[in-house]
């Protein structure tokens, strides 16, 4: 079932990279190997998880103080000191305002770690699904999520930090988009034309249905616009 959903999501969003599944756990799972080696950021794990499944503890994320904080992990010293220093550096560089620090989105609960892996290989429903989407399909994603409706609040698309899309998706129990941040792009090496999409695993099937309906609606509008363009051009040339 999950493999079918993964295939359909990839098809509807024309994904260039495999989707990734994240499951927050309270203890180390026996069926998932512990990640090996150190990574510079929490988001680096997303790229590894495109091709392999593994478990990463809270401590495995501590090289990235912001990512650790956003993922809901407790930060013991000296990681907490590095977080404070990093935030101060961001303020000094005028990258963020000091008032923003307290408002950084964060996962609502503390976990022992995260099980990462390709969505297509997941054996159960994950907490979150991550995908890299291009601008044209981010439009479809945004419309399918309901954020493009004129009767709702303005679209909630995040920027820095890129990983903030994850707790936002959990908080709203719905899809979330992020433009990404310079740190995310540095550490993941993702192409400049791609943004980050986060979907709660429990909402994936329903959202794929919404994506399919939105894609059909856009194809209908494309046919209308193409016919209109041809008619206008024909009249202009007569």
Image: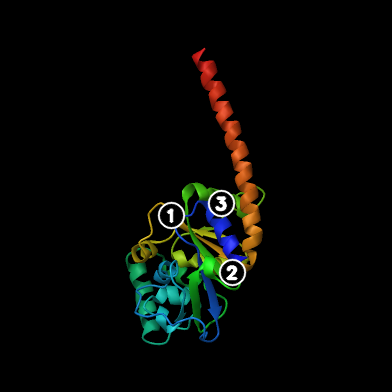
Separation of disc 1 and disc 3 at Cα? Answer: 15 Å
Q: Earlier in the sequence, mark 1 or mark 3?
A: 3
Instruction: Tell me which residue sits at (58%, 72%) in the image.
Output: 127
Tell me: 160 left or right of 144: left
The residue wearing badge 1 is 194
Q: How dense is the environment of label 1, judged by Cα within 10 Å: few (below 14), some, or many (20 and up)?
A: many
Q: Earlier in the sequence, mark 1 or mark 2?
A: 2
Of the two numbered discs 3 and 2 in the rendering, the one whose residue sits closer to the viewer? 3
84 versus 3 height, above or below: below
Contact flag, marks 3 and 2 (Cβ < 8 Å): no
Q: Where does residue 51 sit, x and y in percent of width and height?
A: 43, 68
Asked whether residue 153 is in view, the answer is no
Describe the element under mark 3 as helix, strand or loop: helix
Describe the element under mark 1 as helix, strand or loop: strand
Asked whether residue 180 is in view, the answer is yes
The residue wearing badge 3 is 12
Q: Where does residue 203 sit, x and y in percent of width and height?
A: 64, 64
Front-most of 90 and 146?
146
Tell me: 189 left or right of 33: left
Instruction: Tell me which residue sits at (57%, 79%) in the image.
Output: 109
221 versus 26 height, above or below: above
Q: Which of marks 3 and 2 is nearer the N terminus?
A: 3
68 versus 137 height, above or below: below
The residue wearing badge 2 is 170
Separation of disc 1 and disc 2 at Cα? Answer: 22 Å
Separation of disc 3 and disc 2 at Cα? Answer: 22 Å
Q: How dense is the environment of label 2, judged by Cα within 10 Å: few (below 14), some, or many (20 and up)?
A: many
Instruction: Tell me which residue sits at (60%, 67%) in the image.
Output: 201
């Amino acid at each position: 079932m999950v493999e079918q959903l993964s295939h359909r999501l990839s098809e509807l969003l024309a994904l260039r990279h495999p989707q990734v599944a994240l499951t927050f756990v309270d203890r180390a799972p026996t069926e998932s190997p512990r990640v090996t080696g150190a990574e510079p950021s929490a988001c680096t794990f997303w790229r590894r998880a495109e091709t392999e499944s593994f478990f990463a503890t809270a401590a495995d994320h501590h090289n990235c103080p912001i990512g650790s904080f956003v993922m809901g992990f407790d930060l013991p010293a000296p990681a907490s000191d590095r977080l404070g220093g990093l935030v101060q550096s961001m303020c000094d560089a005028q990258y963020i305002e000091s008032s923003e620090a307290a408002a950084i989105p964060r996962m609502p609960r503390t976990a022992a770690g995260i099980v990462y892996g390709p969505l297509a290989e997941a054996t159960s429903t994950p907490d979150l699904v991550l995908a890299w989407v291009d601008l044209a399909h981010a439009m479809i994603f945004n419309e399918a999520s309901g954020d493009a409706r004129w009767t709702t609040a303005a679209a909630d698309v995040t920027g820095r930090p890129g990983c903030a899309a994850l707790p936002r998706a959990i908080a709203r129990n719905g899809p979330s988009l992020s433009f990404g941040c310079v740190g995310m792009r540095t550490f993941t090496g993702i192409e400049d034309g791609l943004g980050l999409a986060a979907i709660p695993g429990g909402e994936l099937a329903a959202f794929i249905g919404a994506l399919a309906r939105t894609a059909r609606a856009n194809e209908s509008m494309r046919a209308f616009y193409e016919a209109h363009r041809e008619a206008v051009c024909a009249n202009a040339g007569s």
